[in-house]
Image (spheres, rainbow, N blue to C red):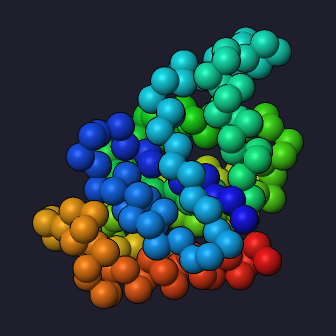
Amino acid sequence: MKLLAISGSLRAASINSALLRVAAKLAPPGLSIEICCDIGVLPLFNPDLEADPPSAVIAFRTRVIEADALLIASPEYAHGITGPMKNALDWLVSIENFAGKPVAVWNASPRSIHADASLREILNTMSAEIVEEASIALPLVGAGLDEAGMLRTPAIADAIGAALACLQARLA
């Protein structure tokens, strides 16, 4: 089973991106996690380009379609999801294969309720299947944990492992 993990942050020191890299390290046998690092290179969404999309869009869409499920972690900016995340999702709206795609929504800050709600609204509008039992909010912002620290912190590592196990069970 193959997951595509997408971070809504372009920051090099992004806690959301670090969370997804930790998930890849904790993936149980039979589950592979590919980290998607290219949403920042997607051109701004333009419906006029749908008939002949740019190569970056084709590559992104292909990775999404080929994944059995998506794992999305996005920070909150101005009470919403990031611009790059919204842009990436806009490029997926017209993809038939996206409807019914299982998605786990991860949040590195339980206080980011607006972005979480916004992301879920967008995904529901796109007919994704949000896998609630695999969706988690972890108190990572301000915790001072890097990837190694997340792996060494039982509460964090166990929550990630449990969420991945739920997603894997849903896909089986």
Vertical arrangement, residue 44 with respect to residue 130, above or below? above
How many marks overall?
0
Vertical arrangement, residue 129 with respect to residue 126, above or below? below
Give the quarter of the image for residue 164.
bottom right
The residue lying at 80 percent from left, 59 percent from top is: 100
Residue furthest to the front in view is 29
The answer to whether 89 appears left or right of 145 in the picture is right
Looking at the figure, which quarter contains the C terminus? bottom right
Name the residue nearer the viewer: 171 or 82: 171
The residue lying at 73 percent from left, 78 percent from top is: 170
Residue 73 in view (yes/no): yes
The answer to whether 71 appears left or right of 97 in the picture is left
The answer to whether 100 appears left or right of 102 in the picture is right
Name the residue nearer the viewer: 137 or 169: 169
Could you say where residue 32 lies in the image, as x and y percent from the top left? 61, 62
Could you say where residue 71 lies in the image, as x and y percent from the top left? 56, 59
Could you say where residue 154 lies in the image, as x and y percent from the top left? 30, 87
The residue lying at 62 percent from left, 76 percent from top is: 29
Could you say where residue 64 lies in the image, as x and y percent from the top left? 69, 44
The residue lying at 82 percent from left, 15 percent from top is: 51
